Amino acid sequence: MIILKLGGSILTKKDLKDPEVDYSNLNRIANEIKTALDNKSNNSELSEGLIIIHGAGSFGHPPAKKYNIGEAFTEEQYPKKRIGFSTTQNCVKKLNTIICDVFINHKIPCVSVQASSFITTKNKRIKSFNLDLIEKYLNEGFIPVIYGDVVLDDDLKIAVLSGDQILQFIAKNLKIKSSKINNLESKKEIILGTDVGGVFTKNPKKYDDARHIPKLSSLEEIEKFDSTTNIDVTGGMVGKIKELLKLADIGIESKIINANEPKAIFNVLEGKKVRGTIIKRDN
Amino acid sequence: MIILKLGGSILTKKDLKDPEVDYSNLNRIANEIKTALDNKSNNSELSEGLIIIHGAGSFGHPPAKKYNIGEAFTEEQYPKKRIGFSTTQNCVKKLNTIICDVFINHKIPCVSVQASSFITTKNKRIKSFNLDLIEKYLNEGFIPVIYGDVVLDDDLKIAVLSGDQILQFIAKNLKIKSSKINNLESKKEIILGTDVGGVFTKNPKKYDDARHIPKLSSLEEIEKFDSTTNIDVTGGMVGKIKELLKLADIGIESKIINANEPKAIFNVLEGKKVRGTIIKRDN
């Protein structure tokens, strides 16, 4: 089984007045996914199922920031906060609808899964998330498409649930059989498609001397890098790595790749080697 | 608590090439809901919570019909059927997103709830539907907005789940306390806003001599009416009545009103008398 996260940064355009989809990237990636699915007999992991998770990008971050979703608030502030929840939920749903539209145009049998319809958190971490239906959709040959969302939180009332945390939870908890004959669990391949080719010692978009890190096994390794230009500037990379290290702790390895690079998604779905950073604990 | 169904026929325009929202109706109804919510101290039932359910109208019925969702199919037909599922799901999600947008513009703290993310059916009837999260949203002062959708079905693989069946299930199974002090269950008011003022002996849009039925307690009563112009022509009215009779059987009465009539929704949310048909068993 392959769990593919598509970062909001590659599907949407940043720093515009209104949120906008990057249709050029989206169409290219949809085409790569469809082509890999048509060839899926080439890769047993893909033929065992594909889950796609996408970020919120410029659709989700501005409203979540405007209404300070995830920060403590008073009872008097709740009416405004509720509208912030409604607005953010509807914005990320719009992005998901556009993504599914493009997938459907490419004949990808996607099924949208809305986190806020059935997931809750406690202090920003997933508390309840029933995976049964996602498993059913996979078994029926669908490709679940789940995305970063706002959810109810036991402690904070409302919180942002990132696509990265969703990825981590699904990778950790979903059990799919590799075939109907034996009872072996399907091996999971975890791929994060971002707008950089993995982890670098500095921000590679700004510094020519940024060095690529092919394998990462702890946060301490990152701290050794240049402190003023740490990787946090490249769109919350540390948050991603923290989620992936939780997977590494239980023996699940993952890979960060550059989804802006043509054919990177296709190659990774085909089981081919793609340049990136592997997150894996040392044994 | 009030459970309000807004029929697809009043929120969307019929018989157009592409699905279209009836913004005039939608904005008017959103305004009526918001005004009633601002006055909710006038009506204890509204102050105990509001759930809105909407139909799929011209967004859902054409793709569901095109792909024969809900009819048996062979394994060879499954790939096309899956795309039919994806397409229908995305179309009704678009309608829901537009409705939520208008609600948010009117400062209604709505939260979209996607049936296909957590509900399944067996032979077209709801099999699993966990109401906990809807209850939580209500307790937090949100207005859940749930809608007719496509879902996985144990027998048929995929099926259409109508807003009317969702209404019936929630009305029957959701238990909300009327106050935090005592343990009394909130009385439920079930309202169906359609494009006619209830049940008539004939289609009132076509026949001047159609008589209005103020109260209905069985399907047999309907069969006595003019057989060639029975009420089924007014958009699946018999299906609605069947769901409502299930509620009547357990003592829950409901009312069908004309949501095209200005102030009908407002008045009903205010607890005022509105012309319509009450569905209730004789005692």
Image (cartoon, coloured by chain):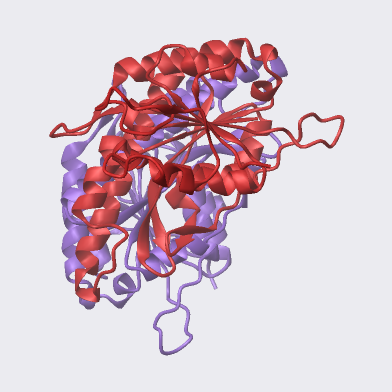
Chain colours: A purple, B red
Tell me if residue A64 can be seen.
no
* Displayed quadrant of residue B58: top left
Residue drawn at the location 32% of the way across and 47% of the way down: B89
Q: In the displayed orientation, state which residue is furthest to the right.
A: B182
Q: Position of residue A130 (x, y in %)?
A: 56, 58
Q: Identify whether B126 is placed above or below A68.
A: below
Q: Position of residue B82 (x, y in %)?
A: 27, 60
Tell me if residue A7 can be seen.
yes
Q: Which quadrant of the rendered structure holds the C terminus of chain B?
A: top right
Q: Would you say B277 lies left or right of A4 here? A: right
Q: Position of residue A194 (x, y in %)?
A: 33, 46
Q: Identify whether A226 is placed above or below A5.
A: above
Q: Position of residue A237 (x, y in %)?
A: 44, 43
Q: Which is nearer the eye, A187 or B277?
A: B277
Q: In the displayed orientation, state which residue is furthest to the bottom.
A: A181
Q: Which quadrant of the rendered structure holds the N terminus of chain B?
A: top right
Residue drawn at the location 24% of the way across and 27% of the way down: B206
Q: Which is nearer the eye, B130 or A3?
A: B130
